[in-house]
Image (cartoon, rainbow, N blue to C red):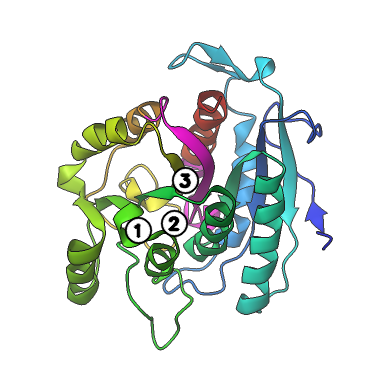
Amino acid sequence: MSFNLYKNSFLCSSNDYENSKVVLAGIPMDFTVSFKPGSRFGPSKIREVSVGLEEYSVYQDKNLFNKVFCDMGDLELPFGNVGKCIDIIYEFAKKVFNDGKTPIFLGGEHLISFPLIKAAKEIYGDLVVLHFDAHADMRDDYLGEKLSHATVMRRAGEVVGFNNLYQFGIRSGSEDEISFARENSNIFFVYEIENLFEIVKKLKNKKVYLSIDIDVVDPAFAPGTGTPEPGGLTSSQFLEIILKMKDLSVVGVDVVEVSPYYDISDRTSLLAAKIVRELILLIE
């Protein structure tokens, strides 16, 4: 299967796919968004503003200039055909994982995580998903649809096993989905974020996939998202959380739900770009 990709590059990235451990790819899909659409423009904006960052991280004392990583561009998807998009994303991710790469996928809406996690699970077997989000995303369906950004973690849990799904920063959800999450997954609300650090210690020998919805951060710091939810983490808190992942065996990441048109300041996209920079430097 061949893939069509539009090129648009992140700060300091190269075209050297073969020699890169970390690869970036944009998944510009937002067909099931339930409130404010526009996250399809997230990948290109994250790349655009990345040039405003330094190549050097004061947090890690590391420099992107010393890291060989590739930006593959944006995956071309058939507009409006959710099922076909899911298949294309899955096949694309499966190839990247099969090639031994650690991908960082830029969304796009959160539904893209389902085929990405499915592909990672197929390659790595026993897989743990760490999910950072304002919303539980655990509905079985949304308005009758099984495939939605509101159902993505329900679908992901069915793939990896709900015992391997850890959710952090949650502060929104229906009564039914929160009840389901409490009974089946490992859900931690925004006021329980400190539990993350003990869980990270327990997962050092596991293969871990990170799914990061930018709305886990409070809209005061990240207003450019489709379903903003007050009461979230600060940007500093979340960067600290990222740095706590340094001892984990991270096999894949997605950063989703950046909708740049709702943030004239670009601070949401800049935060996403900074998160991506730190992840590139963090992953060995």
Q: Is residue 241 above or below residue 61?
A: below
Crowding near the residue tagged with mark 3, few <14, some 14–19, many ≥20 C-alpha atoms within 10 Å: many
Q: Find numbered disc 3 in the image and state the secondary structure of the residue it sits on.
A: strand
Amino acid at circle 1:
Pro
Residue 31 inside the magenta-drawn segment: no
Give coordinates of residue 122: x percent, y percent: 57, 57
Q: Which residues are magenta?
A: 245-269
Q: Is residue 54 left or right of residue 91?
A: left
Residue 234 sits in quarter = top left
> In the rendered image, is residue 44 in sight?
no
| Residue that sits furthest to the top in the current view | 61
Amino acid at circle 3:
Tyr
Give coordinates of residue 89: x percent, y percent: 65, 62
Q: CA distance from mark 2 to mark 3?
A: 22 Å
Q: Is residue 126 above or below residue 13?
A: below
Verify CB contact (< 8 Å) between mark 2 and mark 1. Answer: yes
Give coordinates of residue 160: x percent, y percent: 42, 59
Identify the residue position indicated by label 2 in the image.
225
Amino acid at circle 2:
Thr
Residue 196 sits in quarter = top left
Q: Is residue 169 above or below residue 22?
A: below
Crowding near the residue tagged with mark 2, few <14, some 14–19, many ≥20 C-alpha atoms within 10 Å: many
Q: Is residue 99 left or right of residue 156?
A: right
Crowding near the residue tagged with mark 1, few <14, some 14–19, many ≥20 C-alpha atoms within 10 Å: many
Q: Find numbered disc 1 in the image and state the secondary structure of the residue it sits on.
A: loop
Q: Nearer the viewer, mark 2 or mark 3?
A: 3
Identify the residue position indicated by label 1 in the image.
228
For the point 42% across and 31% down, the residue is 248
Give coordinates of residue 21: x percent, y percent: 67, 31
Which quadrant holds the N terminus? bottom right
Q: Find numbered disc 2 in the image and state the secondary structure of the residue it sits on.
A: loop
Identify the residue position indicated by label 3 in the image.
209
